[in-house]
Amino acid sequence: MGNHGGSRRRPGVEDGELARRWAALWRELPRATAADDLEGVHDLRVASRRVRAAMELDVARHGKGWHRSLRRTAKAVTRALGDTRDCDAALAAFVAARDASAPEHRAGADRLVRRAAANRELAHAAMVDALGEIMTPRLKRKVRRRFGLPDGDLTAASGEGATS
Amino acid sequence: MNGGAASPAEQAWARLAPRARALLATAQAATDPRSSAQLHEVRLAAKRLRYAAEVLQPALGEHGAVVLAGLRRLQFVLGEVHDLDLRVAIIESELLLSQQELAMAASRLLADDPASEAAALALLVKPAGEQDPRPGLIAVLADHRRQRADALSAYRLAWQDLEAALQCVTVPGTARNQ
């Protein structure tokens, strides 16, 4: 299980809970990096926020430094997904607006859909690159070592370090 | 707290209190409803509190469920405002680009025939049939402005309810101990 060392001070968050929250990131990763799974991006972003919240609450147990690099990593995941999530929402809204538009408004609505789709493609490519740099086999080993996560929980869905 | 050991519920609420105070302060500082940046800060503060509350939920009791429901509602309406603001920026940008394209077309028209001033002006001010994107862009923009006003009203209502619930989190000896 986790590396508590001699630093236990106050109740924090159970290692099992932290492990489950980290495992959720790898579980959601393949869907988030798939080209057309809008919910996958949202779900991975939520998972990254949840693991951050759990680690922030766990500061009471281990002190600030213990989680610092992993908290930064989880925050980087949240950030990496932000633009794609915004583009997904914009594209869906503009497609709906186009489908409901009058013929004399169609050209403008089409233009917005094309712009949003182009933005989304760029954002998604940047996101896949960023996640590939963040969610590495090294990170996986670190999370496994720290929270005592069984191999299967981290590898079942994604394979070592896979991001697409 | 009563001087003795704090109950699990008291400990949980005490851990949430700084995030609740941060949200209250951020929301009270967000005085300009047109400011996307201010409302975005409120949304981030609400997320921090919400995800922390979810971790501690089993210890928070009934009032925890009330606070969490309020936070989800607030986050949803602020998410709407955020998305609408981003889309408005895209629509404005496309409107500007389409005006620039028409200005260039007017300039090319005048290059071919310097006497065609009236036609060049008409190109800029009158919709040029179904291929002109501007009427559609204006229609979508108007719809987004209406939606934003509605979302802002929903935010005010959501905040009113949540603010009352959060007072119990930040003021000792109230509902947080239930």
Image (cartoon, coloured by chain):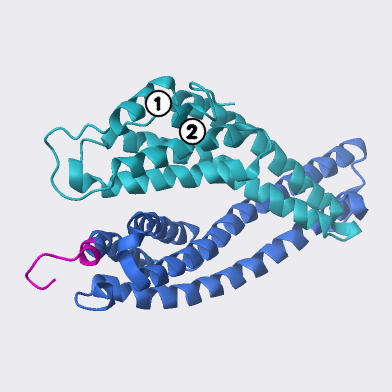
Name the residue: 75% across, 46% down: A113
Q: Does B64 sit above or below residue A130? A: below
Are discs 2 and 1 less than 8 Å apart at CB? yes
Instruction: Look at the image and tell me whether residue A145 can be seen.
Output: yes
Q: Tell me what hue chain A is rendered in.
A: cyan
Name the residue: 56% across, 29% down: A128
As drawn, the chain in blue is B
Which span is picked out in magenta? B1-11
Exactly how many numbered labels are in the figure?
A: 2
Does the magenta portion include B160? no
For disc 2, the neighbor class at 10 Å (few under 14, some 14 to 19, many from 20) is: many
Type of amino acid under label 1: Lys
Q: Chain of mark 2?
A: A
Q: Quadrant of residue A129?
A: top right
The residue that label 1 is drawn on is A140
Name the residue: 46% across, 68% down: B69
Q: Name the foreground residue: B115 vs A12.
A: A12
| Apparent side of residue A12 relative to residue A71 in the rendered image (left or right) | left
The residue that label 2 is drawn on is A26
For disc 1, the neighbor class at 10 Å (few under 14, some 14 to 19, many from 20) is: many
Residue A117 coordinates in the image, percent (x, y): 71, 40
Q: Does A84 sit above or below residue B79? A: above
Residue B14 coordinates in the image, percent (x, y): 22, 63
Residue A49 coordinates in the image, percent (x, y): 42, 46
Type of amino acid under label 2: Trp
